[in-house]
Image (spheres, rainbow, N blue to C red):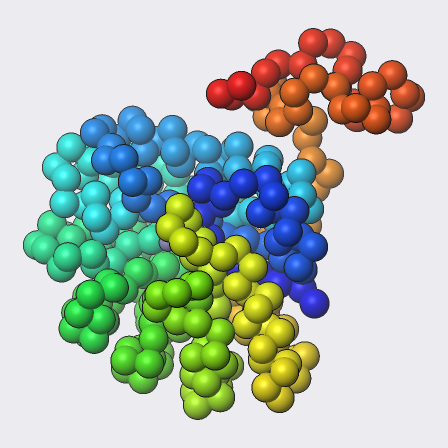
Amino acid sequence: MRLFDPHIHMTSRTTDDYEAMYAAGVRAVVEPSFWLGQPRTSPASFLDYFDSLLGWEPFRAAQHGIAHHCTLALNPKEANDPRCVPVLDELPRYLVKDQVVAVGEIGYDSMTPAEDTALATQLQLAAAHELPALVHTPHRDKLAGLRRTLDVVRESALPADHVLVDHLNETTVKEAKDSGCWLGFSVYPDTKMDEERMVAILREYGPEQVLVNSAADWGRSDPLKTRKVADLMLAEGFDEDDVDRVLWRNPVAFYGLSGRLDLDVAAPDATHEGNSILRGAPKDLDEGPGRAPGQGDAPVAPAPGA
Ligand SMILES: [Zn+2]
C-alpha cells in the first residue's frame, strides 16, 4: 500500500514518526506552512521557516525514504498581525521554487477584514504563478466559514478545480463538493473527523476529488491516520483501487497541477548545508569501508541545536 499524506506539519514531528510513517506505507508528504505557535514578529522569521521547509525538512524526510514538498503562504491567523503581512511581498520569489506545489495554507481563522485581504491576495498569487491553492476552513462557524471562503474563491482568478478546501466535515462536504473544489479531510484522534466518519463520508459522496490527511502538528494528532483510514476503507468494503485513489492518486493529481511534483526520493545527501542529523559517525559504520560518504572522514558538523 502506498500512501501520500497531503497535509502534515513534519516540523513538529519526531524521527520516530518518520520511521513509523515509512513502515506504514507513507512515501510522500506535503507540508503546508502554518502558524508556529509562538507569534512571529517580522517577515524574516517567515523566510527562515520557508527555507527550512525547502531545505532541512526534505533532507530529513529523504533519510526515511519519503518525498517531501511544501506549500507556502502567510497563514490566516498571522494575517491579522501587521508586523507579519509584509511577507506577502516576499512570497513571489519563493513561489517559483521547485518544491513548492501550492500556495497555502490560506483561508479564514476568525474571518476578519485582514484575513479577507490576505486570502484574496494569495489566491491571486496562486493564479499568477499557475499554482493550486490549499485553503484551510475555520474550525468555528464551519458552514459560514466555508461559504465565505467559496465566495472569495469564486471572485478570484483561480478556477475551483485548482483549489483544495481542507478540514471539511459532514456539515460542509456537500457545499464544498458542489463548488467543484477538491475536498480535504483532516482525521484526528479526538476532535474533528475520525476514521469511521471519514469512511461514512466516502460511502455517501464517493472518492472523487477527496484527499485525506492527518494534519499532524503539535496538538494531539496521529501521523498514521492516513494508514488507519486506508485500513478501515478495506475493512468496510472499499477495494484497493479506491484506497489507492484517495490516498495516493488524488493527492498526486491535485499537487501535480503545479507541474512540480517529483515523487522519486533521491538518495539522501549526507549533509544539508554541512550539517548532518548524526551525532558523530554511525555506530556500525565507524571504521568499515561501507560507511556513508562524508561521514566519519572528518569531524561531523553538529546538527543544528546539538
Ligand atoms: Zn495545517
For residue 233, which quarter of the picture? bottom right
Observer-nearest of 24 and 123: 24
Query: Please, is residue 35 above or below residue 261 in the view?
Result: above
Residue at x-position 49% and y-position 88%: 203
Q: Quadrant of residue 88?
A: top left
Question: Residue visible at 49% across and 57% down?
Answer: 222
**Could you tell me residue 43's position as x and y percent?**
25, 31
Can residue 7 be seen? no
- Viewer-nearest residue: 169 or 153: 169
Of residues 118 and 129, the one drawn nearer to the viewer in this rendering: 118
Locate residue 133 relative to residue 63 in the image: left or right.
left
Relative to 82, is 195 above or below?
A: below
Give x and y (percent) for residue 91.
31, 40
Residue 81 in which image quadrant: top left
Q: Which residue is most to the left?
A: 113
Q: Pick the quarter of the image with the N terminus.
A: bottom right
Residue 115 spot, x, y in % from top left: 16, 53
